[in-house]
Image (cartoon, rainbow, N blue to C red):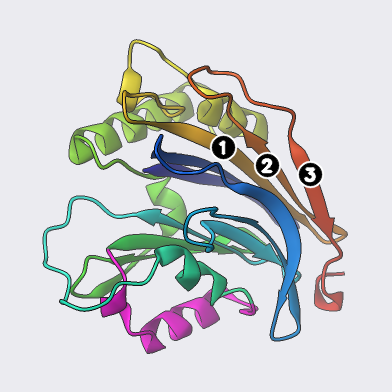
Amino acid sequence: MCTVSWWSAADGYELYFNRDELKSRLPGFPPEELELDGVRYLSPRDADAGGTWLLVNEYGLTVCLINQYPLRRPVKVGPLVSRGHLVRRMAACAHVAEVERRLGEEELFSFRPFQMIAVEPGGTGAAFAWDGHKLTPTENAHEHMPFTSSSYLSEQIVQHRRERFARIVAERGDMTPADLLAFHREHNIGAGAFSVCMQRDDAETVSLTQVVVRPDTISMTYAQKVPGRPNFAEPVRVSLKPHACLS
């Protein structure tokens, strides 16, 4: 359960991520600056399993993950690792191609199905779907936005959100950052689980994160949603000095 989209320009991009979770899970921790193999990155943290669903590093590379439904192929029997730890393992990657290489080296049978999305400066994006049996790259990832998932009525909800996105594009042309933000904040009470900012008895959207990458700045703005309401709490913003190669 989650929704991801991004806007790109020659000098950077903006990415938006709605995190949807079961109400039984603890609230996530806001983003902080961390480091892996000498590479600095910004990331919120999952309070239950300790991993993350989203990070952006000093190279301007964003890596995020949404769950993959429905599970059509059985996952290999064995101990499973939280998918959020797989995202953290990509924190030192400098480019999308490196994410793909590292994914190919992972023992993915330790993880439940997922879609991993990676975006680098210039807005070049890629997506990789693990269905529990094989890893499949998505060609021209930008054309497949929004990337979204739901554990409930999976195919119908994914289709509904993509059709909603397509209608906005048809009405306005290319989506601006403001359009994307409005899309991710859409809370249609009547639509319930189908809404982008969703709500159902056992789960809801719990946070909205914005990543901004420019040659002179990298920032992450994180807003937790007020439980049971469409409102978001005061956002937390953290920033990171870009690696010299971005200047």
Foreground: 189 or 173? Answer: 189
Q: Report if residue 146 is visible in the image.
A: no
Q: Counting other residues with Cα less than 10 Å from the Cα at mark 1, is it few (<14), some (14-19), or many (20 or more)?
A: many
Q: Position of residue 203 (x, y in %)?
A: 36, 32
Whether 12 is among the magenta residues is no
Q: Position of residue 208 (x, y in %)?
A: 58, 37
> Which residue is rendered at x = 36% and y = 60% of the image?
115
Q: Main secondary structure of the magenta part?
A: helix
Left of 145 or right of it: where is 90?
right
Q: Quadrant of the N terminus?
A: top left
Real-space CA distance between mark 3 and mark 2, rounded to the nearest whole angstrom: 6 Å
Q: Report if residue 163 is visible in the image.
A: yes
> Which residue is rendered at x = 28% and y = 38% of the image?
158
Q: Secondary structure at mark 1?
A: strand
The three-letter code of the residue at mark 3 reads Arg
Residue with the mark numbered 3: 237
Quick check: marks 3 and 2 in contact, CB under 8 Å?
A: yes
Earlier-in-chain disc, 3 versus 2: 2
Residue found at the far top of this picture: 190
Real-space CA distance between mark 1 and mark 2, rounded to the nearest whole angstrom: 7 Å
Tell me if residue 44 comes above or below residue 89 in the rendering.
Answer: above
Magenta stretch in the rendered image: 92-112
Q: Position of residue 224 (x, y in %)?
A: 62, 34
The three-letter code of the residue at mark 1 reads Ser
Residue with the mark numbered 1: 207
Residue 91 lies in quadrant = bottom right
Whether 99 is among the magenta residues is yes
Foreground: 10 or 68? Answer: 68
Q: Position of residue 128 (x, y in %)?
A: 37, 67
Residue with the mark numbered 2: 222
